[in-house]
Image (spheres, grey):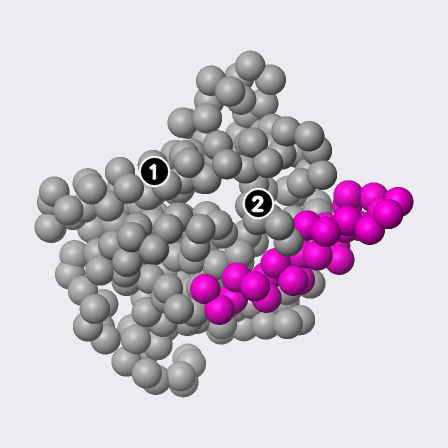
Amino acid sequence: MANTLNTPLRLALIGMSGAGKSFWTRKLAAQGSPALSCDDLIEQRLQPLLAAGGYQGIGGVAAWMGWPDSPHYAEREAQYLQEEIAVLSEVLDDLSRDAQKPLVLDTTGSVIHAGNHLLLRLRRQMTVVYLAASEQERQLLIERYLADPKPVLWRGAFQPRPGEAPRDTVARCYPALIAARRQSYEALAHCTIPLAELRDPSLTAADFLEKIQRALAGDSSTR
Protein backbone atom coordinates (compact mmCIF):
# COMPACT_ATOMS: atom_id res chain seq x y z
CA MET A 1 0.00 0.00 0.00
CA ALA A 2 1.42 3.38 -0.96
CA ASN A 3 2.08 5.98 1.72
CA THR A 4 -0.78 8.14 0.42
CA LEU A 5 -4.54 7.81 0.50
CA ASN A 6 -5.62 6.04 -2.65
CA THR A 7 -8.50 6.78 -4.96
CA PRO A 8 -11.09 5.41 -4.56
CA LEU A 9 -10.99 6.06 -0.82
CA ARG A 10 -10.95 2.75 1.04
CA LEU A 11 -10.47 3.09 4.78
CA ALA A 12 -10.78 0.43 7.48
CA LEU A 13 -10.83 1.87 11.00
CA ILE A 14 -9.58 -0.46 13.75
CA GLY A 15 -9.21 -0.17 17.52
CA MET A 16 -10.93 -1.00 20.78
CA SER A 17 -14.62 -0.40 21.39
CA GLY A 18 -15.14 3.24 22.30
CA ALA A 19 -12.09 4.51 20.42
CA GLY A 20 -14.18 6.50 17.95
CA LYS A 21 -14.35 4.20 14.92
CA SER A 22 -18.11 4.59 14.54
CA PHE A 23 -17.97 8.33 15.18
CA TRP A 24 -15.49 8.97 12.37
CA THR A 25 -17.20 6.53 10.06
CA ARG A 26 -20.43 8.49 10.49
CA LYS A 27 -18.57 11.80 9.95
CA LEU A 28 -17.13 10.54 6.67
CA ALA A 29 -20.47 9.07 5.62
CA ALA A 30 -22.13 12.45 6.24
CA GLN A 31 -19.69 13.92 3.72
CA GLY A 32 -20.71 11.37 1.10
CA SER A 33 -18.31 8.47 1.65
CA PRO A 34 -20.03 5.07 1.36
CA ALA A 35 -19.70 3.37 4.75
CA LEU A 36 -20.46 0.08 6.46
CA SER A 37 -20.53 -0.96 10.11
CA CYS A 38 -19.36 -4.51 10.77
CA ASP A 39 -21.29 -4.48 14.05
CA ASP A 40 -24.53 -3.74 12.18
CA LEU A 41 -23.85 -6.45 9.59
CA ILE A 42 -23.03 -9.03 12.26
CA GLU A 43 -26.18 -8.10 14.15
CA GLN A 44 -28.22 -8.66 11.00
CA ARG A 45 -26.72 -12.11 10.53
CA LEU A 46 -27.42 -13.01 14.18
CA GLN A 47 -30.97 -11.64 14.06
CA PRO A 48 -32.80 -15.00 14.23
CA LEU A 49 -30.87 -15.95 17.38
CA LEU A 50 -31.30 -12.50 18.90
CA ALA A 51 -35.02 -12.34 18.18
CA ALA A 52 -35.57 -15.70 19.87
CA GLY A 53 -34.27 -14.19 23.12
CA GLY A 54 -35.89 -10.79 22.69
CA TYR A 55 -32.60 -9.02 22.02
CA GLN A 56 -32.04 -6.18 19.58
CA GLY A 57 -29.37 -3.62 18.71
CA ILE A 58 -25.65 -3.95 19.29
CA GLY A 59 -26.31 -3.78 23.04
CA GLY A 60 -28.64 -6.72 22.53
CA VAL A 61 -25.81 -8.66 20.91
CA ALA A 62 -23.65 -8.01 23.97
CA ALA A 63 -26.52 -9.10 26.27
CA TRP A 64 -27.07 -12.24 24.15
CA MET A 65 -23.38 -13.14 24.47
CA GLY A 66 -23.45 -12.48 28.21
CA TRP A 67 -20.58 -12.06 30.63
CA PRO A 68 -17.59 -14.29 29.85
CA ASP A 69 -18.28 -16.51 32.88
CA SER A 70 -21.81 -17.42 31.73
CA PRO A 71 -22.38 -21.04 30.58
CA HIS A 72 -23.24 -20.10 26.98
CA TYR A 73 -20.55 -17.47 26.44
CA ALA A 74 -17.92 -19.67 24.75
CA GLU A 75 -20.45 -20.99 22.23
CA ARG A 76 -21.82 -17.54 21.45
CA GLU A 77 -18.35 -16.01 21.26
CA ALA A 78 -17.56 -18.60 18.57
CA GLN A 79 -20.84 -17.84 16.74
CA TYR A 80 -20.11 -14.13 16.79
CA LEU A 81 -16.60 -14.64 15.40
CA GLN A 82 -17.96 -16.92 12.69
CA GLU A 83 -20.36 -14.19 11.56
CA GLU A 84 -17.64 -11.54 11.79
CA ILE A 85 -15.42 -13.58 9.48
CA ALA A 86 -18.32 -14.03 7.05
CA VAL A 87 -19.09 -10.30 7.07
CA LEU A 88 -15.48 -9.27 6.47
CA SER A 89 -15.10 -11.83 3.69
CA GLU A 90 -18.24 -10.57 1.95
CA VAL A 91 -17.12 -6.94 2.19
CA LEU A 92 -13.71 -7.72 0.70
CA ASP A 93 -15.23 -9.92 -2.01
CA ASP A 94 -17.49 -7.02 -2.97
CA LEU A 95 -14.54 -4.63 -3.18
CA SER A 96 -12.65 -7.15 -5.33
CA ARG A 97 -15.49 -7.19 -7.83
CA ASP A 98 -15.46 -3.41 -8.26
CA ALA A 99 -12.02 -1.79 -8.26
CA GLN A 100 -13.56 1.71 -8.29
CA LYS A 101 -15.83 1.24 -5.28
CA PRO A 102 -14.97 3.50 -2.29
CA LEU A 103 -15.72 2.40 1.26
CA VAL A 104 -15.16 3.39 4.87
CA LEU A 105 -15.35 0.27 7.04
CA ASP A 106 -16.11 0.51 10.76
CA THR A 107 -14.60 -2.74 12.03
CA THR A 108 -15.16 -4.37 15.40
CA GLY A 109 -12.57 -4.44 18.14
CA SER A 110 -12.15 -8.16 17.50
CA VAL A 111 -11.29 -7.87 13.80
CA ILE A 112 -7.75 -9.03 14.63
CA HIS A 113 -9.19 -12.50 15.34
CA ALA A 114 -10.54 -12.92 11.81
CA GLY A 115 -7.54 -14.96 10.68
CA ASN A 116 -4.33 -14.10 8.86
CA HIS A 117 -5.72 -14.73 5.37
CA LEU A 118 -8.56 -12.23 5.78
CA LEU A 119 -6.37 -9.69 7.54
CA LEU A 120 -3.81 -9.80 4.73
CA ARG A 121 -6.64 -9.23 2.26
CA LEU A 122 -7.85 -6.30 4.37
CA ARG A 123 -4.38 -4.71 4.26
CA ARG A 124 -4.10 -5.23 0.51
CA GLN A 125 -7.52 -3.85 -0.35
CA MET A 126 -7.92 -1.01 2.16
CA THR A 127 -5.90 1.56 4.10
CA VAL A 128 -6.05 0.34 7.70
CA VAL A 129 -6.04 3.08 10.35
CA TYR A 130 -5.59 2.29 14.04
CA LEU A 131 -7.24 4.70 16.49
CA ALA A 132 -4.98 4.24 19.49
CA ALA A 133 -5.75 5.09 23.12
CA SER A 134 -3.07 6.24 25.53
CA GLU A 135 -2.72 4.58 28.93
CA GLN A 136 -4.84 7.33 30.49
CA GLU A 137 -7.52 7.04 27.81
CA ARG A 138 -7.76 3.28 28.24
CA GLN A 139 -9.46 3.83 31.60
CA LEU A 140 -12.14 5.83 29.78
CA LEU A 141 -12.62 2.93 27.34
CA ILE A 142 -13.11 0.58 30.29
CA GLU A 143 -15.67 2.92 31.85
CA ARG A 144 -17.52 3.22 28.53
CA TYR A 145 -17.62 -0.54 28.17
CA LEU A 146 -18.95 -1.06 31.69
CA ALA A 147 -21.58 1.65 31.21
CA ASP A 148 -22.68 0.44 27.76
CA PRO A 149 -21.28 -3.04 26.99
CA LYS A 150 -20.51 -3.92 23.39
CA PRO A 151 -19.77 -7.44 22.11
CA VAL A 152 -16.26 -8.42 23.17
CA LEU A 153 -14.29 -11.54 22.30
CA TRP A 154 -12.23 -12.13 25.42
CA ARG A 155 -10.38 -15.15 24.01
CA GLY A 156 -9.32 -16.32 27.47
CA ALA A 157 -8.37 -12.90 28.87
CA PHE A 158 -11.27 -12.93 31.35
CA GLN A 159 -9.79 -14.55 34.47
CA PRO A 160 -12.11 -14.24 37.49
CA ARG A 161 -10.84 -14.56 41.02
CA PRO A 162 -12.81 -16.56 43.63
CA GLY A 163 -15.86 -14.62 44.75
CA GLU A 164 -15.22 -11.75 42.32
CA ALA A 165 -18.25 -10.18 40.61
CA PRO A 166 -18.16 -10.28 36.78
CA ARG A 167 -18.09 -6.48 36.47
CA ASP A 168 -15.10 -6.34 38.83
CA THR A 169 -13.33 -8.98 36.76
CA VAL A 170 -14.00 -6.95 33.63
CA ALA A 171 -12.59 -3.80 35.22
CA ARG A 172 -9.47 -5.70 36.29
CA CYS A 173 -8.91 -7.73 33.09
CA TYR A 174 -9.94 -5.23 30.41
CA PRO A 175 -6.60 -3.35 30.56
CA ALA A 176 -4.81 -6.63 29.85
CA LEU A 177 -7.13 -7.26 26.92
CA ILE A 178 -6.36 -3.79 25.50
CA ALA A 179 -2.63 -4.33 25.96
CA ALA A 180 -2.76 -7.74 24.30
CA ARG A 181 -4.57 -6.34 21.29
CA ARG A 182 -2.43 -3.24 20.85
CA GLN A 183 0.45 -5.06 19.19
CA SER A 184 -1.93 -6.84 16.80
CA TYR A 185 -3.62 -3.56 15.87
CA GLU A 186 -0.27 -1.90 15.23
CA ALA A 187 0.87 -4.80 13.04
CA LEU A 188 -2.33 -4.71 11.00
CA ALA A 189 -2.50 -0.94 10.50
CA HIS A 190 -0.85 1.12 7.80
CA CYS A 191 -0.84 4.06 10.21
CA THR A 192 -1.82 4.97 13.75
CA ILE A 193 -3.74 8.05 14.92
CA PRO A 194 -3.54 8.73 18.69
CA LEU A 195 -6.93 9.54 20.18
CA ALA A 196 -5.39 12.63 21.74
CA GLU A 197 -5.17 14.12 18.25
CA LEU A 198 -8.91 13.68 17.75
CA ARG A 199 -10.26 15.35 20.88
CA ASP A 200 -10.98 18.73 19.31
CA PRO A 201 -14.77 18.76 18.68
CA SER A 202 -14.29 21.16 15.76
CA LEU A 203 -12.36 18.57 13.73
CA THR A 204 -14.05 17.79 10.42
CA ALA A 205 -14.02 14.72 8.22
CA ALA A 206 -11.50 16.53 6.01
CA ASP A 207 -9.27 17.16 9.05
CA PHE A 208 -9.46 13.47 9.92
CA LEU A 209 -8.42 12.46 6.41
CA GLU A 210 -5.56 14.96 6.51
CA LYS A 211 -4.30 13.43 9.76
CA ILE A 212 -4.36 10.01 8.13
CA GLN A 213 -2.49 11.35 5.11
CA ARG A 214 0.19 12.86 7.35
CA ALA A 215 0.52 9.63 9.34
CA LEU A 216 0.89 7.60 6.16
CA ALA A 217 3.59 9.98 4.99
CA GLY A 218 5.40 9.64 8.31
CA ASP A 219 4.66 13.18 9.49
CA SER A 220 3.75 13.07 13.19
CA SER A 221 2.94 16.80 13.38
CA THR A 222 -0.64 17.76 14.07
CA ARG A 223 -2.78 20.69 13.24
Q: How many marks?
A: 2
SS majority, magenta? helix
Q: Quadrant of the C terminus?
A: bottom left
Query: Distance between the Cα atoms at labels 2 and 1?
Result: 16 Å
Residue 83 locus on image (x, y percent):
41, 34
Do callouts 2 and 1 mark residues in contact (Cβ within 8 Å)?
no
Q: Nearer the viewer, residue 104 or 71?
A: 71
Magenta stretch contains residue 185: no
Residue type, mark 1 in image: Val
Q: Where is 111 relative to 207, above or below?
A: above
Q: Where is 178 relative to 71, above or below?
A: below
Q: Secondary structure at mark 2?
A: loop
Q: Secondary structure at mark 1?
A: helix
Which numbered tag is attached to residue 87?
Answer: 1
Mark 2, residue position? 152
Q: Residue at x 42, y 36 (%)?
A: 82
Residue 1 locus on image (x, y percent):
21, 68
Residue type, mark 2 in image: Val
Magenta stretch contains residue 183: yes
Residue interval drawn in magenta: 158-184
Q: Is residue 123 visible?
A: yes
